[in-house]
Amino acid sequence: MFVKRVILGKGKKRHFSRFQQIGALLKSSFFSLMLLFITSSVNSESIILNPVRYLLPGKKEYSEPSEIRIEKGKIVSIRKINSFSGKVSYALPGFCDANVTLSTDSLGGQKDRAGIFLSLQSFFAHGFTGILSVGDPAWVETLLKDAQRLKNNSPWVKKSDTPWIAESSETKKLGNLPGYNVIRSSQEAVSNMKKKPTSPVHLFYRYQEGESFVFDGPFLYQLKKTADAEKIKLALSAFGDEFSILEGINAGIPILYHPIPEEITKRISSGVFRNLIWGPMFSVYYYQKIAGTTEWEADLIAMKEWSPYFAKNIAPEPEFAGKLTHIREEDRKDAEKEYNSYLAFLGRQKNLSQGMLLASGTGYLHVHPGIGGWKEMEILASALGNEETIRIATESTCSFIEAPHEGKIREDKPAFINIFTEDPLVDLKNLKSLRKIIAGEISYPPEKREPASSQKKEEKMKESEKELFEKMLEASFKKKKAMESGTRVTAIVNSAKKDFVFVTTKEGKLPGIISSEEFIESGLPKQGNEIEAYFLKEDHGDVHFTTCLSGDSLNKDLLEIAKRAEIPVLGQFIGENDSGAEVKIGEFTAFCPFSQIDPELKKSGLSGKRSKFLIQDTRGKFVVSQKKISDKAKEAKLGILKQELKEGMFVTCKVKTIQSFGLIVEMDGLTALIPISEATYKKIPNWKKNFKSAKL
């Protein structure tokens, strides 16, 4: 996630390493423990919960033992019951999480589609029936629609528009940032706001010195004025930075994400927070302060005991994950001091809980889907109590993200319900007793009944489609996981645009992109063309291939991959000496021996010419070869010509040199020999008179 690398890295002194994606596609299993007693009606779309005590809307207490009847995902009746058998269970509204990034792995790097599918199921398994996606690329929305259409065990998801971030030296260095809208001026921001983006618009801002344009107070005030006119709300992620928070609060920004330090109370009246909607995201900073310590290992054990699902499907290996963060002891002490300051502010401002949101920050380091929300609830409960924390996770957050049930259990409303055998209001550890999750027409475990004969065929078709979808996700995951950087593929061009050429691999049908800059000299390929390419990386779900590495973004790691996989690199001859030529490749200077340069290229001079090269050696000064590239190109042409040419065909050639034994000619870049006996019908040919170099 961009914010982890760029914004949090500054000032906080925390650096997050990138690792290969970790994860496996979840099979259809949630809990293998005892289930709530549920009776089923003849109607295959009906569920009866009996006996349950449900959380009364707008209150912090349960109803009398009741029966809740659900049909087609809607609560059709709730009635009190006087007699029942069995133990009463507890029904809470489905939980909601107001800040998750599905495409970012909590152990570093990016998730692919299979990883996101696993995350969705993990949220659902922990009772989160509604989530707000922040900072995810556009392709995630397609997957969400597929999951909903196939009625997979997935929560209701609202995806926010691309977060805005001010252009800085850091964003320029990183180049293209999928999932973020880089704003370069206040005029651009106002213009974008008038295009009526989806509300709320998320602004990412942490104060950075020396930047020419920032989201400071005057800018935020102007933007807030425009947003009010367009009836759009603004949400500010300030990352716990006191200055950024003050700027946002004074400008009247109504929604704030990330914690607030206690020191801010000395500089501003507590009354300014009265109407604030606040998602503190304490768990993000909790894990920053304990990452890589024995405290983190103890927390991991506790989380696995709390959630059997997490232990079985999501929990990382401690030997690996515990080493992801290496910070100095003084930085760790600063992190702990800051975290304690954040909690102290909450302790002094408990009245803010009325506008508080449950926002886990899933996607940040060690904040895993579903269980990360439980951890955020545990932290909030330490200051606010269990009852208020449950209200925040249901009514407050669900109404904010506009979840269908609005965090309540009511007649004639959508059924988003979690069933527990033990009471979470008494102890949040009882979240472990979650036995059934209902989200509209999706429920787990599913109702077991024999459908009517007219429904069997349709249900069988849906199940087959669902299984096919999961198999495709699993296959996609395995293909990407198995493919290493530098893997050579044959790709078919789907379309060529200004920025990217969109391709699909011939084997495996894996979609990907290639930068259009690689085709500046040769021209963009046409739809249907086959091209040889190399797998480079996956970023924000986009699979990047390359035909030739080039540009200032080249680094030694990429050149090592290019050497190992024989990926061409684009370079420019900048000078010659007695033994070879110097070549500029990105920011590096390489040496190309004359023996590794095509003689034809040398004839007209080398300086200033651009060509493709293969990396031969990266020890000390880079050594490259241009001749191997040209030889490969000639071999490819020769292979094509062998297929196309037939004996007796007439072809046009250019004479290169005249020898006593015949003519050396060139045909489509290839050199060929015409023996003396085949060059002319004359018995004693006059070579110089009949033929001249460069003549057709």
Image (spheres, rainbow, N blue to C red):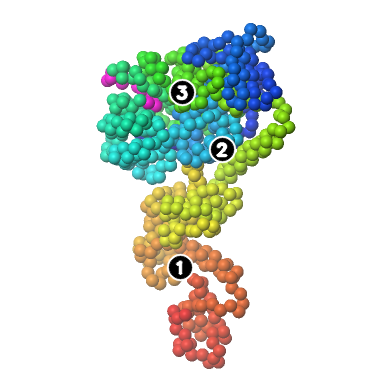
Q: What amino acid is at disc 3? A: Ser
Residue at which label 3 appears: 399
- Is disc 1 in contact with disc 3, using a CB cutoff of under 8 Å? no
Residue shown at 47%/85% (left/top)? 691
Circle 2: residue type: Asp
Find out whether residue 500 is within the magenta segment. no
How many residues crowd mark 2 within 10 Å: few (<14), some (14–19), many (20+)? few
**SS class, disc 1:** loop
Residue 384, quarter of picture: top left
Inter-mark Cα distance, 2 to 1: 53 Å
Residue 598's disc number: 1
Q: Is residue 263 magenta?
A: yes
x, y (%) of residue 284?
Answer: 44, 27
Q: CA distance from mark 3 to mark 2?
A: 24 Å
- Rendered residue at 54%/54% (across/down): 491
Q: Residue at x 42, y 49 (%)?
A: 555
Instruction: Give left or right: position of 67 versus 405.
Output: right
To which residue does mark 2 refer? 146
Q: Amino acid at mark 1?
A: Asp
Across and down, in percent, residue 649 comes to: 58, 78
The magenta-colored residue range is 255-268
Could you tell me if residue 349 is visible in this image?
A: yes
Question: Is any part of residue 16 visible from this angle?
Answer: no
Q: Which picture quadrant has residue 271?
A: top left
For marks 1 and 3, give the CA distance.
69 Å
Lower sequence index among marks 3 and 2: 2
Q: Nearer the viewer, residue 509 or 391?
A: 391
Front position in the image: 289 or 492: 492
Which element is circle 3 on? helix
Tell me if mark 3 has few (under 14), some (14-19) or many (20+) residues whose alpha carbon lies within 10 angstroms of its own: some
